[in-house]
Image: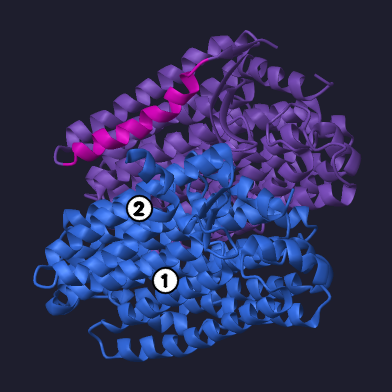
Chain colours: A purple, B blue
Amino acid sequence: MEIIESTKPIYAILISFFATFLIAFAARSPNLRESWTVIAALIKFGIVMSMLPIILAGKTIEYNLLTVMPGLDIAFRVDAFSMFFAITASTLWIVTAFYCIGYMRSLKEKHQTRFYMCFALSLSAALGIAFSANLFTMFIFYEMLTLVTYPLVIHSQTAEAVKKARRYLVYLLGTSIVFQLTAIVATFYFAGTLEFIPGGILAGTASDMVIVVIFILFIAGIAKAGIMPFHVWLPEAMVAPTPVSALLHAVAVVKAGVFIVIKILLYVFGVDLLAELGLGLALAFVASFTIIAASVIALQKDNLKARLAYSTVGQLSYVVLAVSLLTPAAIAASLMHIMVHASSKITLFFTAGAIYAATKKKKISELDGIGKQMPLTMIAFTVGALSLIGVPLFAGFITKWYMATGAIEAGHLIFVGVIIISSMLNAAYFLPIVRAAFFKPLPEGEHPKVKELSGYTAFTVVPLLITAVMVVALFFVAPWVMVLAQLVVASVIGGS
Amino acid sequence: MIANIIENIPGLVVLIVIIAASLIPLVGKSRPVLAWGIAVIAAFLSFIMSLYILNVVMTTGKIRYWFGNWEPPWGIEYVFDPLSAFVLTLVSFVGFIVLVYAKKSLEAEIDPERITYFYALYMLFIGGLMGVVATGDIFNLYVFLEIAAIAGYALIAVGRRREALMASFTYLILGTIAAAFILIGIGYLYMATGTLNIIDLAVILPEIYQSKVVLIAFAFFTVGLSIKIALFPLHNWLPNAYTYAPSVTSIVMAAIATKVGAYVLIRVMFTVFGPEFELTVVHVTEVFLVLSVVAMIIGSVLAIAQTDIKKMLAYSSIAQVGYITLGIALMNVTGLTGSIMHILNHAIMKACLFMVVGAIVYRTGITHIHDFVGLGKKMPYTMAAFTIGALSMIGMPLTVGFVGKWYLTLGSLEAGMWYIIPVILVSSLLAVGYLWRLLDNIYFKQPENASELKTVKAKEAPLAMLIPTCVLALLCIVLGTFAYLPISIAEEAAKVLLRY
């Protein structure tokens, strides 16, 4: 495979880092401040997309920045897999940048400068994770992502937010320091390197027992992936403003989590080693449990954001389940699902935020007839929901299809069952909301006056329509996305 | 002339500080500014000289400097190997930068007529510590240790609060016991070998490892030094001493006093007695291992229980000492490298944190952490430095704190002691616990009652205090990002000590 040395990934990471300073200096003038965010988002997207042709041509981009300690480098590598995450995050940041303006201004939130600064920083960290070439670089950005999202979670600074943010920090920082760092040290000790290599670095370096322990430490250490029982932080994080829940806790942070899980599975352990030790299957069962359990919990939540949060926990485990089946179709499905879930779930969160910004309603039981007040918003919600349920013509269908194919390929029909059951559960917790919104009457004393598309509310509604269109579009462009996925699959399977 | 000075730098590096200490009361009696000026210049020159020494040691190897050309064992010699050059540089650097900071802080915290004497004692303290590191004679080492200790008791006692006297007295008693133990150890060694020169001792001792006298000497050394470095459970003197002393004293004590103690412990264990002794004769490493582990956990837990920031940082020091002794107990190059890197980390990071505390005291007079609400807005740069120091203490990657922990963890694995790793990391997590509570107060907590807010009148620290603080904070990052250089020195030092 041809390697191209380029500093592009570094610029892609740093652009939003530099934007932080511009945002800080523009604190007095909100319009300028938000322009910086939008400009940074556009440039970041441009840089990421400019790398796409190179990657599609089968090449990789590498850059070795510096050696921090003997054996520990800060190095970047962009390959087809990185692109999945990078494109998802940088595309959705543009949309979110506009959404933020509408949401934050219509609710007259405080500390907006801090909010935009941390938001930009978290995008830097997310891309850093996407492009890291070794575990050490990845770990740096993983911790950075936790730290810079903390001020966003604690944003409202109420006693409740302080308490929940503390738990957020303890879960994410705690597991990463105690479990993940141990696993990284052990990997370094046994394998002598921390580099991500397709096919893995750990095979044959330590006894089976040790490898199993390292595996468990890694999985426990990546709490951002939300695998039970390390999912608790995610619903807590919903105390943050909705744009944060939308882009970070449905896309950047949690996708970073599953991205790293996949990366570690395929590039540290390797498909063969996982299959040999049966670790893939074990993880598949844990993920299946998470899928079902999270969906059941989601059913019981009346707070819309809480229900979406538990739905995210379940959907993240789809990604983990798919990759742990270790077959080509399943791995491809897992990569696809990063994009699919991101676009679908961000739509759903955007709608939740738009509803709150326009009507101050947070609970599902209050949403009766809301479709009359905010028809476009609720149509977008329906699109997102149908996609996650897995209805054809929406992006979610593709991944469920490939996932089921993968499960059959692997010869584990039980996971097909898991997918079917969970799809039904998805339907059970999403469809009642749609039904209530469109078919139940409004509560007495409320006018069916359309509250969308006026003032700052428009800024919240247009982005969610765009993401809803993306969800549908993704269904039709899926074959092209699969090309990218095939590149990844080809490199990690079949002894490259 | 110049050549003459360069030739004598290994001696001058300590002497200049001691000379400054004796000059200050003479010329600075009525003019504290002059006293400060002399101190800063002397400390700076000393720092430059120690950098020079470090450079020479790393390029050409060990330096032996004979005072007045008297060959040992008749005369006293200074010996610089990678470890002593490294620690010497660290001590003189912190000594210098704290002095820059000290002027404003002292004017606010101690009686004006005492300021000149404070500088004299301070220089004596630094000079003593540097002497400990430089000397190649174990009795001379004891003398310097006592010079530093006695100056230290006085530096604590000048605190304005009445508790300062009691804290100083407790430290005096325990410090004297420690000194007595060390002196007895030296006496036994002299009895058994007939020499006080460390290099000679290292040659003679292996032949008489089994001697009871040597064993007893070692026991006295270990206990005495454990008090000096405040290793759990001999840490009782430390929290009060740090808490009630003037800020400047707290900074310099927390940053380098216990570190020099750790240096002596390493020197005695690895150079004087030799690693062979601990591995084959007395199995003291197991004892250190257990005590380190307990110190790391108990120190952090007690830190969580504190509401006074100075006391919290003091207890965290007890935990951090545990990291240093852990690396010693691992008895391998990686572990010892981690230990030495942690000495560096703790010196820089603790100095930075205590400087921030000093700045808060200077502006507001508060040390109770619940009163810190709103400081993030009032003193943004100082608090940014605090945040960086805190991240380094937690051991975030790209801070110098991460480097030490990485090597300690790796060293534990190499030694086959994987069960130590959770302790190291859980202790980091406990550090998150006590530091984050503080950061929450500083940045995010809303005041319950705005009129009771004690930080209302606070403003950013004066530049003379802010700059040293920020320099240290930056160093936490620079030394953690470009860690290659300090690591190469620490690793070389560890290899020399373990005789690879």
Q: Is residue B126 left or right of residue A198?
A: left
- Whether the magenta-drawn stretch holds residue A24 is answered as yes
Q: Amino acid at mark 1?
A: Leu
Judge by depth and name the residue closer to the eye, A494 or B250. Answer: B250
The residues colored magenta run A6-27
Residue B234 location (% of width, % of height): 56, 83
* Mark 1 or 2, closer to the camera: 2
Q: Chain of mark 1?
A: B
Residue A422 is at least partly visible in this image: yes
- SS of the residue at dot 1? helix
Residue B63 location (% of width, % of height): 55, 48
List the residue tagged with mark 1. Answer: B313
Q: Residue at x 67, y 45 (%)?
A: A317
Rendered position, A156 above or below B119: above
List the residue tagged with mark 2. Answer: B46
Residue A302 is at least partly visible in this image: no
Judge by depth and name the residue closer to the eye, A298 or B79. Answer: B79
- C-alpha span from label 1 to label 2: 29 Å
Main secondary-structure element of the magenta-colored stretch: helix
Q: Residues within 10 Å of mark 1 (few under 14, many from 20)?
A: many
Question: Earlier along the polypeptide chain: callout 1 or callout 2?
Answer: 2
Q: Is residue A327 left or right of residue B289?
A: right
Residue B134 location (% of width, % of height): 49, 59
